Amino acid sequence: MKVLEIKNVHKIYNETEVQVHAVDDVTLEFREAEFAAIVGPSGSGKTTLLNLIGGLDMPTSGEIIIDGTNLSKLKSSQLIDFRMRNIGFVFQAYNLIPVLSAKENVEFIMSLQGWPKIDRDSRTYELLKAVGLSDRINSRPAKMSGGQQQRVAVARALASRPKFVLADEPTANLDSKSAAILLEIMEKLNHEEKITFIFSTHDARVVKMAHRVITLEDGKVVSDEVRE
């Protein structure tokens, strides 16, 4: 089942009098439960494309359609609500809320969505257990390692059962052991939860584990490799 369609998408930035084609006529489709990596050199358009998919930025032209909804047709308030209900984000810098515990960070989006407390508690514990942090449920970010914080971020991204998770360089700030643990957890959750993961990455470890590798150069797709 298709969860995402990217149709002839362009993103052009005007820097002084020179136009920069950050994303140049990209057309892609993603199906449920894919584990895909977008790779390419710095400046190739990886993060820009991820931001467009996530509705954090709008294309200059073209369409991004998530589960039948065209993002460019939504008003700002509708887009915020749609993003909250359909897309999970994992950032390089973790972006946890410092004053909240691991549990409170994970359940934050569910609270905004109006989940009953009993369901929030159950889902939060289930996910923190899945990422190996059931013993750190009341710990705040400052009391956790970088790898632990990123695992909380993954649990938070999955909390409301989004259509897919966008991960922008999620292993960039982690040591090799923490990165390996994180990737194994994400692949396991991808399989169990049937949620599509799309990574923007330079990390060879992510590329090795990906089931699909899309390569960008100068904003264009130059290869799209699906692995068994």
Image (spheres, helix red, strand yellow):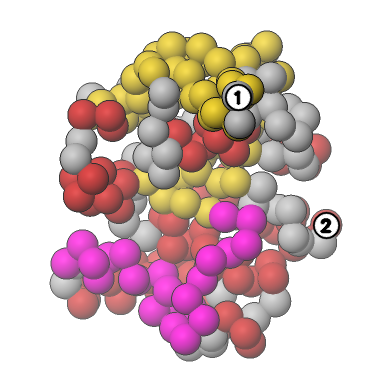
The residue under label 2 is which amino acid type?
Ser
Label 1 sits on residue: 17
Q: Nearer the viewer, residue 11 or 79?
A: 11
Task: Name which residue lies at 76% across and 61% down.
Answer: 174
User: Which residue lies at the image location 75% right of the left edge and 34% below the top edge?
Assistant: 42
Q: Which residues are magenta?
A: 91-114
In this view, the mark in front (1 or 2): 1
In this view, 28 is above or below 93: above
In the image, what residue occupies the spot 37% across and 60% down?
A: 159
Could you say which disc has been placed on residue 53 in the image? none
Which element is circle 2 on? helix
- Quarter of the image holding residue 222? top right
Asked which quadrant contains residue 94, the reply is: bottom right
Looking at the image, residue 32 sits to the left or right of residue 198; the answer is: left
Q: Position of residue 188 (x, y in %)?
A: 56, 48
Q: Which residue type carries mark 1?
A: Glu
